Image (tube, rainbow, N blue to C red):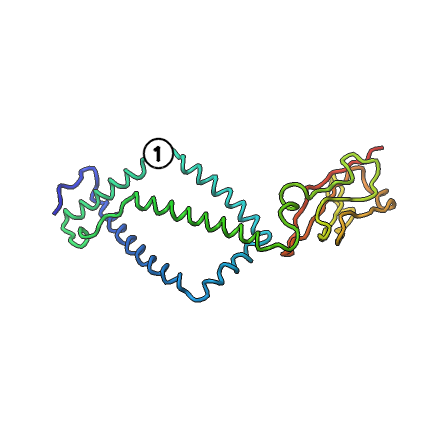
Amino acid sequence: MSGPRDPDVPPELDDVARLLDEVAALEEREAKEADALERAPGLEKVGPMLEAAWSGKLLDEVANVEKTEAKEADALRHAPGLDKVGPTLEKAWAGAGSARADRGDADGAARRPVSAGRWIRRAILFAAAAGILLYVGIRVGRDSNPSGPSGTYLSDGEFRVVHPPERATSWDRIEWSGPAQGTYRVRVRDASDGRVLLGPTDVNGNTSLPLRSEDTARWPRRIRIEVEIRRADGSWVSAPPRISELQS
């Protein structure tokens, strides 16, 4: 038997110690399964499959999730009282191990109590590894999709409507910036109620769409211009809409 049990630790924590022993056994079994997974046939095909899955619209969603998780991780790292969690769990688990030994549980006494610091360190390592894998996967997915418009015209404001201006004297054409070889879709709406006035009209290999005066003569004074570009995976990405008002 070991020394006297900690009076600050209730006997009910024996169940906690027993649960931790079961978790340790489960961890050992999972480690063996992970080693076997590394040698699983066909594992080399997983990377290309994930790269294909992460391309296109899903890639943008993953990037947004990554930003949110990074902010939450920073907030958790600075949470008040976090530095007290490790010592508190260490004391509780150590006391549970002592109580178990006092009750003559030889099998349980032979097992070493799991360290709270050990579990916290492992959790941090797992989270860091997952973040690295996610970052690498996103970069690989982007680099492996060279065909079709990407990057410059999809995220930093260069894909935009440039004509007509917000205050126009006439509506003779719609013009936008983007790759010349792109495929575009143009739509014009009533700025007040969203009613479609023109389109959707597909434009291939051009960055402008002429407008007929007999059509624009029936339009209201304020219109909303929407232009989309088709990505290599078939999804559509919108430029910021342009509100144009006809001046008399």
The residue under the point 28% across, 53% down is: 24
Residue 198 % position (x, y): 78, 48
Of 127 and 75, the residue lying toward us: 127
Of 135 and 88, the residue lying toward us: 135
**Horizontal side of residue 222 vs 52, given as left or right:** right
Q: To which residue does mark 1 refer?
A: 81
Q: Residues within 10 Å of mark 1 (few under 14, many from 20)?
A: few
Q: Up-down: is 45 above or below 184?
A: below
Q: Amino acid at mark 1?
A: Gly
Residue 75 % position (x, y): 44, 36
Task: Indicate the quadrant containing the C terminus: top left, top right, bottom left or bottom right.
Answer: top right
Q: Residue furthest right?
A: 214
The residue under the point 60% across, 53% down is: 56
The residue under the point 26% across, 52% down is: 21
Residue 209 % position (x, y): 79, 48
Q: Up-down: is 223 above or below 27?
A: above
**Horizontal side of residue 241 vs 24, given as left or right:** right
Q: Quadrant of residue 30?
A: bottom left
* Mark 1 secondary-structure assignment: loop
Residue 130 % position (x, y): 44, 49
